[in-house]
Amino acid sequence: MERCCFSGRNGFGFECLHGPPPRHEVSQAFVQINLGAEPEPLGVDPDLSGWSKAIANGYPLAAVLGRGRYADAATRIFVTGSFWCQAVPMAAAVATINALRDEDAVAVMEQVGTRLRAGLDQLAQEVGVPIRQTGPVQMPNLSFPADENYAKAAAFSATMLERGVIVHPRHNWFLSAAHDDGDVDRFLEAAQHGLEAVLGCD
């Protein structure tokens, strides 16, 4: 099996030790960046994929999708779970998947994320703070070059929090289809102050 991993060095993508990503033989778990088979935008066609969290909008549910040739092996594995007999997570998953499709939610998140990322880039240039943004726009990650012990990230997130916007200092953020232009405006207003706080770290 070809060993592959995510790479943040050149944006968001797959990097393999020997050549381009394989079309098969990759076991993986991805987050929701595409309504279809998640890895499609990355050019990967996995044999198995794991889905959880967002599939039922926060209700306890996970799923493994895979090629038919693995179905027999799955019947020989004994697994148990606390929530398997609950109908509510199943109904939540159906409602969530339908809403994602009907509301074109992935495109909405991409649009909002693109505006957030562009606005943050512009603010950083205006304030004079070098930043690095990685990950897909629906799950942006902000870091600061030469940020030992995450002091700059902590100053940014603390200042954002003081203005009612919660961002993690060392982890990617998650946009949802509920976010809109008003949320981006509020984020950017707080980010202006957050970036100014980062200047004080130098």
Image: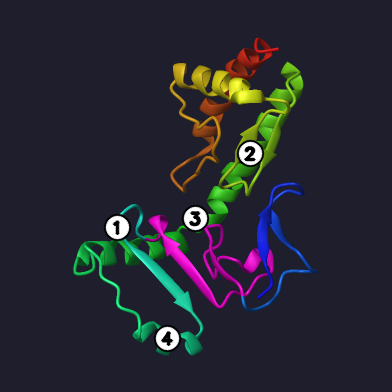
Quadrant for the N terminus in the image: bottom right
Q: Is residue 20 above or below residue 12?
A: below
- The crowd level at tag 2 (other Cα within 10 Å; few <14, some 14-19, many 20+) is some
Q: Amino acid at mark 2?
A: Arg
- The crowd level at tag 4 (other Cα within 10 Å; few <14, some 14-19, many 20+) is few
Q: Which residue is mark 2?
A: 115
Whichever of labels 2 and 4 marks the residue nearer the N terminus, that label is 4
Q: Is residue 106 left or right of residue 137?
A: left
Q: Which residue is mark 3?
A: 105
Q: Which residue is mark 4?
A: 73
Mark 2 lies on a secondary structure that is helix
Q: Nearer the viewer, residue 105 or 19?
A: 19
Marks 3/4: CA distance? 35 Å
Q: Is residue 188 above or below residue 142?
A: above
Mark 4 lies on a secondary structure that is helix
Whichever of labels 2 and 3 marks the residue nearer the N terminus, that label is 3
Q: Are marks 3 and 4 in contact (CB under 8 Å)?
A: no
Marks 4/1: CA distance? 25 Å
- The crowd level at tag 3 (other Cα within 10 Å; few <14, some 14-19, many 20+) is some
The boundaries of the magenta stretch are 26-55
Of marks 2 and 4, the one in the foreground: 4
Whichever of labels 2 and 1 marks the residue nearer the N terminus, that label is 1
Q: Is residue 45 left or right of residue 75?
A: right
Q: Amino acid at mark 3?
A: Ala
